Image (tube, helix red, strand yellow):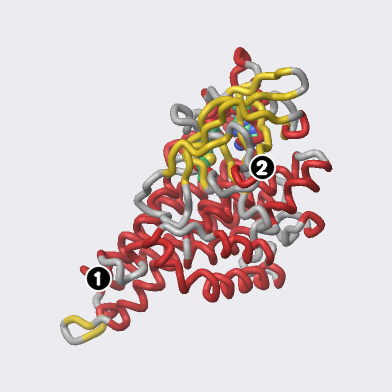
């Protein structure tokens, strides 16, 4: 067992750290304040291969491994969690199409999104009444001649209004439950896709630099070349993609928490009460010690899931454990980091206030903590043959 990153993983981590500090840090607070979508930033990250970290180089990605992807997500989220979530979803979509798409789809779609030319990819699975239970979705794709007409609403779609390509899940066989669901790649609004519109953009507690759209599909027409991975095979694709996505979100949570903890340590070393820096007070030291221990435990769980995915081993259970633990503990770490800052932590003058808001959603999207527990419990039952 080797806990040190390889030379390649360290190189890409350093690239992500540098670009996060140079490109993202200067305007991260301003983007949060005014809700600017980081389009120019995403294009630049695309140029570095960070929108498709595990995507092969011939398709425009970095051709790196899953551990490297986790490290990239951590570094970006440490500075700007809003950019990180757009990067995470784009990686998830690009990897999925790169893996299961036809040659034509891979060549047409993947380079366009990972280069940043089409800014981002989006993952349109959830619906207003189907989030934790995507088998219950109602958006429908009806065959008319040699075309498909897709009608329905999609909810909570990260970058849904900006993405160049959107994977949309729709029912193609209404009586068949999860086996009647198909994934389609639909060109985004920037292509002027007829019948596609934004129902609303959510006003959120955090991640103000990321957009979360409700998408309305009103008879959007696509051909067979839009079907991803076969008719009726969509649910399985969603589950596969979400297993990998959960490594991305646990990495995002770790990055946010690391940024908050670093800020708390800095502040505690400078701020004095009772004649000494507060970091010398045992009460503060204990908070920092707990936070650092949880952070390392979250990191180890996440790297284990990433290493198993890279090795081609089953990793559903490990990805859910990593997401559950990392996101729950990251919430607690941001809370402690804010507490260390006292009243100042509650103001927008210190970045820990943004971290506290941004981290909250990591326990919700790409499967709530409750869904992660359900997945882990089912895996335990399966392993026990019970
Ligand atoms: N990998 C591959 N296949 C899987 C799988 C996995 N991890 N999990 C299940 N499957 C397969 C099963 O083998 C089964 O296949 P068969 O058709 O051959 O039988 C099929 O999928 C159905 O499995 P289940 O009966 O277990 O499915 P279920 O309906 O009980 O649901 C669940 C399982 C894990 C709870 C699932 O519904 C789930 O993950 N829910 C949460 C959804 C989620 O995370 N949504 C977030 C959306 S994305 C987002 O947040 C927006 C964003 O932009 C960030």
Q: Nearer the viewer, residue 151 or 287?
A: 151
**Quick one: label 1, few (<14), some, or many (20+) residues within 10 Å?**
some
- Left or right: residue 100 versus residue 218 is right
Residue 9 visible in the snapshot: yes
Question: Number of numbered discs present?
Answer: 2
- Left or right: residue 10 versus residue 368 is right
Extreme residue toward the top, this view: 175
Q: Quadrant of the N terminus?
A: bottom right
Extreme residue toward the left, this view: 274
Cα distance in 3D space between marks 1 and 2:
45 Å
Q: Give the residue at mark 2.
A: 314
Q: Quadrant of the C terminus?
A: top right
Query: Can you give x and y, in whole percent of width and height, for residue 309 in the image?
Result: 67, 49
Q: Earlier in the sequence, mark 1 or mark 2?
A: 2
Residue drawn at point x = 35 percent, y = 59 percent: 356
Q: Quadrant of residue 233?
A: top right
Residue drawn at point x = 73 percent, y = 46 percent: 109
Label 2: state its secondary structure: loop
Q: Nearer the viewer, residue 146 or 175?
A: 146
Q: Quadrant of residue 61?
A: bottom right
Q: Which mark is residue 70?
A: none
Q: Quadrant of ligand 1?
A: top right
Query: Can you give x and y, in whole percent of width and height, for residue 283 in the image?
Result: 24, 70
Residue 372 visible in the snapshot: no
**Quick one: label 2, few (<14), some, or many (20+) residues within 10 Å?**
few
Q: Give the residue at mark 1.
A: 344
* Vertical relation: 128 (above or below) 87: above
Residue drawn at point x = 45 percent, y = 67 percent: 28
Residue drawn at point x = 72 percent, y = 43 percent: 97
For ligand 1, tell me if the residue under mark 2 lies within 8 Å.
no
Query: Can you give x and y, in whole percent of width and height, for residue 280 in the image?
Result: 27, 80
């Amino acid at each position: 067992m080797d806990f040190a990153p390889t030379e390649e993983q360290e190189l890409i981590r350093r690239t992500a750290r540098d670009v996060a500090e140079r490109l993202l840090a200067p305007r991260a607070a301003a983007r949060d304040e005014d809700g600017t979508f980081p389009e120019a930033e995403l294009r630049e990250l695309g140029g570095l291969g960070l929108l498709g970290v595990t995507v092969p180089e011939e398709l425009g990605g970095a051709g790196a491994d899953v551990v490297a992807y986790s490290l990239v997500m951590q570094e970006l989220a440490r500075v700007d969690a809003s950019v990180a979530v757009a990067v995470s979803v784009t990686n998830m979509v690009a990897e999925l199409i790169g893996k299961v798409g036809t040659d034509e789809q891979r060549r047409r779609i993947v380079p366009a999104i990972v280069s940043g030319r089409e800014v981002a990819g989006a993952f349109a699975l959830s619906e207003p009444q189907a989030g934790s239970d995507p088998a219950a979705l109602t958006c429908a794709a009806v065959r008319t001649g040699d075309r498909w007409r897709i009608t329905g609403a999609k909810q909570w779609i990260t970058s849904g209004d900006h993405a160049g390509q959107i994977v949309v899940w729709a029912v193609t066989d209404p009586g068949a439950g999860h086996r009647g669901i198909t994934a389609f790649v639909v060109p985004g609004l920037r292509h002027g896709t007829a019948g596609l519109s934004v129902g609303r953009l959510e006003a959120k507690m955090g991640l103000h630099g990321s957009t979360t759209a409700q998408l309305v599909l009103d008879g959007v027409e696509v051909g067979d070349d839009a079907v991803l991975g076969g008719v009726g095979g969509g649910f399985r694709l969603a589950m596969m993609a979400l297993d990998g996505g959960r490594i991305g979100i646990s990495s995002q949570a770790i990055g946010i928490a690391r940024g908050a903890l670093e800020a708390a340590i800095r502040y505690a070393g400078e701020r004095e009460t009772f004649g000494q820096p507060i970091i010398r007070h045992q009460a503060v030291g204990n908070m920092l010690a707990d936070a650092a221990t949880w952070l390392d435990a979250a990191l180890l769980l996440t790297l284990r899931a990433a290493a198993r995915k890279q090795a081609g081993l089953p990793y559903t259970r490990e990805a859910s454990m990593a997401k559950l633990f990392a996101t729950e503990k990251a919430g607690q770490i941001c809370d402690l980091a804010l507490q260390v800052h006292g009243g100042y932590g509650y103001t927008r003058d210190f970045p820990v206030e943004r971290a506290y808001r941004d981290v909250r959603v990591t326990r919700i999207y790409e499967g709530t903590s409750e869904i992660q527990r359900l997945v882990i419990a089912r895996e335990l039952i399966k392993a026990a043959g019970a």
